[in-house]
Image: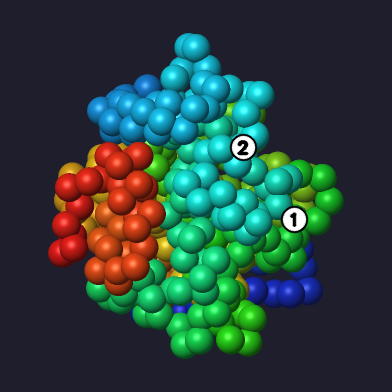
Amino acid sequence: MHGDGSDPINIDEGEDSGWLHRYGKESGLRRQEEALTQQLADALASCEPGDRKNDELKHIIGQGAAEWFKQHNCRIRADLPYCLDSSEPWERSLIAPAVADLIDESRIHRRFRSGLSSQAMLLNLVGPLLLKGDFTPIEAALRAQGIEWPHGISRGEFEYEDPCVFNEKGPGTPTSIDLALFDSKDVPRIFIEAKLTEERFGGCSKADDCPVRDANPLVDLDACYLHKQRGRTYWRVLAETGFLRGVLAIAPRCILADHYQFFREAAFAVQKGGTFILLCDARNVSLWGNDTNGRGGLFSRLRDLLPQAPRERTAGVSVQQIVAAIRETGGYGWIEEFASRYGLLDVRHDS
């Protein structure tokens, strides 16, 4: 089994799928009979939909949203009082209306009007900071978690894309990062994925019909629809960025089938020379776990599987830690409204 110090994968740029196909046969899968650790088996097991681990969190945030919409005289859905009625402009979900200027309407998610929307939460939490060009609270929260802060962060962009990374030009939705932070040279350095009540990362949309879902696609990449039919370079980038130097290369099933979003976005950030950050509510027991520092959840289990180089460029910070840093900074009265809406009034400055 590869360790962190193993030799890098040699990529023959003169061929298309042969480089990784051969790697899978000759380097990884011939050792598939080796005992995989329980850690690997646990982390790559699908988070079963409907396990309802976050029901309490959804109830708390839903109640806060319903009350906030009521206080602001918003029209709401009769069946779901924590959701705006479709007749309401999406901007009514924003605590600071001016934040709407930071994102194009075409990039608003379909469920943005829900009080459980992660995208709305992200805009409500950091949007006012971006309007003022004040990244101090975000920097403080990330540094407190041991996350390197690039010099000269000067702007942020919601729903950042670069179709060239995975050859995602043409039909289909390219990889989109919830928030990218750019340095003084206008290079994206921090790539943030926001999660509120979600219990898992998104899986591959083609997994149900994929012949290699329950096998390692490195055996035959031509059987991977996204690789062969769509020409996506996910596997090539995973190799180039070092993700396949460890146990993931000999995983007994496709690592993208259930955790496509995690590996795709993390590899995207590393390929761009940046750091991938999960911003998650610390009460999210499925993704974050029961530890306030984010141990024990799906995110930490997946991160622990990564070889050292990409693991050091993958980290997590909680919504609570950002809230505490904003409060510590002072001068942002709206953070109390945010805390009330999302049930975070008891978050302390030392969270």
Disc 1 residue type (three-letter)? Glu
- Seen at 25% across and 45% down, the residue is 344
Q: Is residue 7 shown left or right of residue 273?
A: left
Q: Which of 16 and 144 is in front in this view?
A: 144
Instruction: Locate residue 242, reporting x and y percent.
Output: 49, 71
> Is any atom of residue 299 visible in this view?
no
| Residue 217 position within the rendered picture, expressed as x and y whole percent measured from the top left | 57, 48
Q: Earlier in the sequence, mark 2 or mark 1?
A: 2
Badge 2 crowding class, 10 Å Cα cut-off, few under 14, some 14 to 19, many 20 or more, is many
The disc label shown at residue 90, or none = 2
Q: Nearer the viewer, residue 80 or 19?
A: 80
Q: Mark 1 points at which residue?
A: 168
Measured from the top left, where is residue 347 in percent x and y? 20, 52
Nearer-the-camera pick, 118 or 29: 118
Disc 1 element: loop
Looking at the picture, how far across and down is residue 307, in whole percent?
38, 69
At 52% from the left and 27% from the top, the residue drawn is: 74
